Amino acid sequence: MTKTSNLELDNGLTPLFYPTTLKTKILKALAEFECLTVRDLTFQIFFEVTESRMYSVWRCLKHLGPLVTSIQYSDAPTEFGTKPDAWGLSRLGVRYALIHFPETDPVELSPEHSKLTVGHEIFRARSHYVIREYCTSQGWQLQWTKSNLFKGRKPVPDDNFSIKHLTLPEGQNKLYFVFEKERKKKDFAQLMEKIEGYERLYNTDEAEHRFGSRKFRVIFQMENDTRRINFVEHLAGICRCTTWKGKIRHTCLSVPVKKNKYWFTTDELMFTNPGGNIFITPKDYKDAAHSFESAFTP
């Protein structure tokens, strides 16, 4: 006989909830990844995507009622003749997740969330998923944090996470990362504001309080390789300044930031080869590329 679960709504009503296997998998996925499409959920649950399975997931989402929220976002590709919804947990869904799978660090997808930035959250979730799958394949422990990121205190990362290598000795077996997904084009000044914030935070008590460690790496996941290499070279101090009225107008950095704690990759590299040498840094981008595995090597 299927067990039921009583959930108290904000208006005092208590709907009857039947936690089937599919419902539980969907709620746990939304709790872990915050914001997913039906296609994303279908792939994570069934490991393949077919129209019939997508329909099963969509129908189950509809039955979850007050536990979930959906938002149609403007820059999504059209599926089955319409724009797909992005799905996440409601406030009630977060309360349920905190009871049943608190390790996922669930956060609410607010109905007021801007449709213009939902695509950004989807890409964050997909990056989280491929990193989790890679860590699982290596036997590493991944701890991902979406909440309690001190919003309002710059810099505010999209996420932060740590990876623990279970076969290395203590003190050498844990890496800390701050994750920045750059989906919309930003100019160098906007990106430098983030870099300067992380420079101020690095190796401070506040960094340990916010990210779990005084020392950390910052992953910038760019939309394409052109944007990636342009900003890496800007940090490295490469001058591509133009001449105007016979004079060079310097917008390059007078003091380069040639540091290996800033890792740069692209969407394509992250989604297709998360365990590879997909990261470059301003310090050695001409000569080397890095990976999660190589980061454990002193």
Image (cartoon, rainbow, N blue to C red):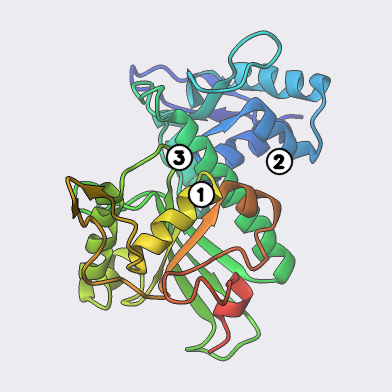
The answer to whether residue 138 is above or below residue 56 is below
Please state if 25 lies on the left or on the right of 226 as rendered: right
Separation of disc 3 and disc 2 at Cα? 23 Å
Separation of disc 3 and disc 1 at Cα? 13 Å
Kindly check if marks 3 and 2 are in contact, taking CB atoms under 8 A apart as contact: no
Crowd band around label 2 with a 10 angstrom C-alpha radius: few (<14), some (14–19), many (20+): some
Label number found at residue 69: none
Among the 4 quarters of the image, the one containing residue 107: top left
| Observer able to see residue 182 | yes
Name the kind of residue labelled 2 in the image. Answer: Gln
Q: Quadrant of the N terminus?
A: top right
Q: Nearer the viewer, residue 38 or 247?
A: 247
Name the kind of residue labelled 3 in the image. Answer: Arg
Choose the circle earlier in sequence order: 3 or 1.
3
| Observer able to see residue 20 | no
Choose the circle earlier in sequence order: 2 or 1.
2
The residue identified by callout 2 is 44
Separation of disc 2 and disc 1 at Cα? 31 Å
The residue positioned 64% from the left and 34% from the top of the image is 26
Helix, strand or loop under label 3: loop
Label number found at residue 183: 3
Please state if 48 lies on the left or on the right of 214 as rendered: right
